[in-house]
Image (cartoon, coloured by chain):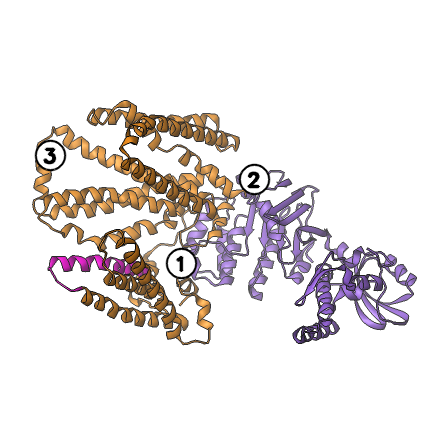
Amino acid sequence: MSGADARNLTFTKHMFVLPARTRTLVAWPMFSGCLIVALVWLINAYFVFRTSGIAAPLWWPAAAFALLLATFQALSWTPFAQRWLHIVLTVAVLTSPILILLLVVSFNIQLSEPVITGLMIGSIPIAYVAALSGVGMARRGDAYDWRAWNRLVEWLAKWRPVATHPFRSLSGAQLWYEWRAHVIVPVFIACLLPCFIFVPAIDRTNVELGWRQLGVMLLAPLYVAMMAGGALGYLTDPTSKWEAGVFILARPISSLAILRGKLVTAALQTAVIWILFLGYISLLLTRPGFPQSIAEVAWSVPVWKVIGYPILVLALLLLLTWKSMVEGLWVCLTGRKWVEQANSFGFMGLAIVGIGIGLWIGFHPELHQPALAAVPWLIGLLLVIKLAAAGFVVRGLIQSRLTSPGGAALMVAIWLVVVGSLCGLALALLPSEFAAPQNIIPGIALFIPFSRIAGAPLALEWNRHR
Amino acid sequence: MIASQRDTADNVIEIRDVTRRFGANRALDNVSLAVPRGVVFGLVGANGAGKTTLIRHVLGLLKAQTGSVRVFGLDPVNEPVSVLSRIGYLSEEGDLPGWMRVDELLRYMRAFYPTWDEAYAQDLRKQFALDPAAKVKTLSKGQKARAGLLVALAYRPELLLLDEPSSGLDPIVRRDILGAIVRTIADEGRTVLFSSHLLDEVERISDRIAMLKGGRILFTGELDDIKQTHHRLTLRFDSDRSQPPALEGILSWEGRGCEWTAVASGRLDALTLAASAAGAEVVEQKALSLDEIFIAQVGSSTAAVWELQADVLSSSSHPVANLLAIALWLCRHRRVLPARDNAHPSAAEALDNPDRRIGCSGGRLVLRRFVPVGQLSPDGSV
């Protein structure tokens, strides 16, 4: 096993030199981990759910959590020469409970709780043996190596020409770098989607379920993009160490050019993600009655809507996917872990507070009217904050000579055009009861980011010159 | 030493009064430094002395909190592209992307530098035996260092910055790195600034050096001048002495009886005069290597604290403390522990005086203040 492979292990490597048998090294963390997750569930189920009147099952979920943890430990402690194989196996194993559940439901298999619990607890030793084998291999510096794959890669490498011709421009080189450094995202999605290939086959004759699945599948790339955007913000590939960004920062390239490479890469990744997802979504057409249902809807509306709406929806989804990918770039570009953590915890805190306030208002009907009256003020406040942030960012860009006043004006103009176009489309196409201008215009203005994208070069400068 | 090819008086790097803090830690403390064009400039200092921090200021990766940094007359923070396009940089960490193949690395780097010399790059690649199809992550540490050196040299930068380039590398790779420095300065007007712990290398190829300690520059100048102002003197006294005298410029003492050897900094004639005044005759004088100068300049205060701890421990009644005291005593008589030996008797007594200690328990000693030898007056007062 090379050093690179050893780095992937999550097992604490200094424990390999302890005077202890491998089975001891494996057994203790696995046993204590399983015990803790099982106890956490039992305490929650008994003292939280059951006291709240929810008849939560006790034993089989506890056993399921313990089995899941043991399986995950076995996988993460096992060294693989091919890292992607590690990822694929982990995804396959972690999605297998869904498949098993579907099989149980599909074939109407009736099992009592003690039997399910027994089966799960009985499977933990299998995970232990797998972990023992993996840690044993890692301890003697070995790894599971798919030799046939290596031969294939070597064979392909022979045919791959040596890269001698120069890039046409610095931008081209940077785009190539960003694409290659973050190619793991589309590869990961391409590996992940086959694990969900069974979803379109669920309850195949249920047309309504098909429409729901279509909705979920169309929104899924947005979530994927948010994750991918986090990785794209790093200056190196996601697996490199944090300090490795010096490789880029010590190059004679402007922060704006680095960011441009990231924005274009995000656009390319958006296209690839959607090609993969459209291929996956097309599986819905295999559901009996679903193509007919689509045709019925198409016949019931004017031809221009049949052609225009799907194009418009797809264009908006592409834009939203790209937006999801790039609006969080600034966080990682600061190069500071504390900013990332503050951002994550800040959003979580805001979400929790927001949900709490929402629920509180929901349970108190006397507050509904004042809350509705406060909404315009709240939107106004948010718009003022957005405007102030935009002003701060524009001033920072000009002061740090990242752009000229003309360049800043162009950025603002682009934002206005995008917001104006979306407002126009929304007012023209949405039913009037949902599309009051006083709702649509502030909503879209708040939704389309300015400071988060325009401020990204400032974040990078802050990282670059500490 | 390789002769410098200085033909102009202008400085490639000018650092003025730069201070840098990381939290409570002061990494650079009012540092001023000038690196003339066409020289090989060595930065030496212990770990944490501030060498990498200084180099990162030159690259513009750190912004001076006070003072100014100019490289080619430009501010590397305000004009990074102009400055970085003229600098070749090799870091100790080997921060090349692991997923790149060697040929891809060369192709990518070529895009950044209009002066990239492809023939030279391929020549270096062959010389360093780097397989173009090999991924960087599969290269050994030495090969990674060679790959980093290749991409730092292939565009013939005006300034080559090497941050601990030889750290942890075998002699063959170190030879390649030294060869690269030689090649770089072979071109007229090109400059090398490098930091290293391997002082024999620094001594072999540097024209000028700066020695850093605790974020401050202890001294900087021509290597020859520095070597000419550091000496190992063997002094013979008329009678046996339990302690050596306090002489200005003495960095460390070693010896017993009537013959003592001192490492000293200063003009030889002044040192000889001072020795005569103290009743000693200089019986032998030797030039010091940079390694010896470094140890004498940087290592003294650490050794002194050890010595004092040994004294405190030896007064303890705890058996473990006594064992440690014996071990430290043995160390003292096998190695040079300069500060105690070097201290004036009255100063040594003052340091051992319990009144000057803040606390002494469990083998830990905290002094109200520590006084290096150089700050003692001839009568031992502070």
Q: Is residue B81 above or below residue A16?
A: above
Give the amino acid type for the residue marked by disc 2 in the picture.
Answer: Val
Tell me if mark 2 has few (under 14), some (14-19) or many (20+) residues whose alpha carbon lies within 10 angstroms of its own.
many
Q: Quadrant of the N terminus of chain A?
A: bottom left
Give the amino acid type for the residue marked by disc 3 in the picture.
Answer: Ala
Residue placed at 9% from the left, 40% from the top?
Answer: A293
Q: Main secondary structure of the magenta part?
A: helix
Q: In the rendered image, is residue A167 in sight?
A: no
Asked whether the residues under marks 3 and 2 belong to the same chain, the reply is no
**Mark 1: which secondary structure?**
loop
A290 to the left or right of A223: left
Q: Which residues are magenta?
A: A85-112
Q: Mark 3 = which residue?
A: A298
Q: Which chain is purple?
A: B
Tell me the quarter of the picture where residue B343 sits.
bottom right
Q: Chain of mark 2?
A: B
- Mark 2 against mark 1, which lies toward the viewer? 2
Q: Chain of mark 1?
A: B
Give the amino acid type for the residue marked by disc 1 in the picture.
Answer: Ala
Check if residue A99 falls in the magenta segment.
yes
Q: Mark 2 = which residue?
A: B77
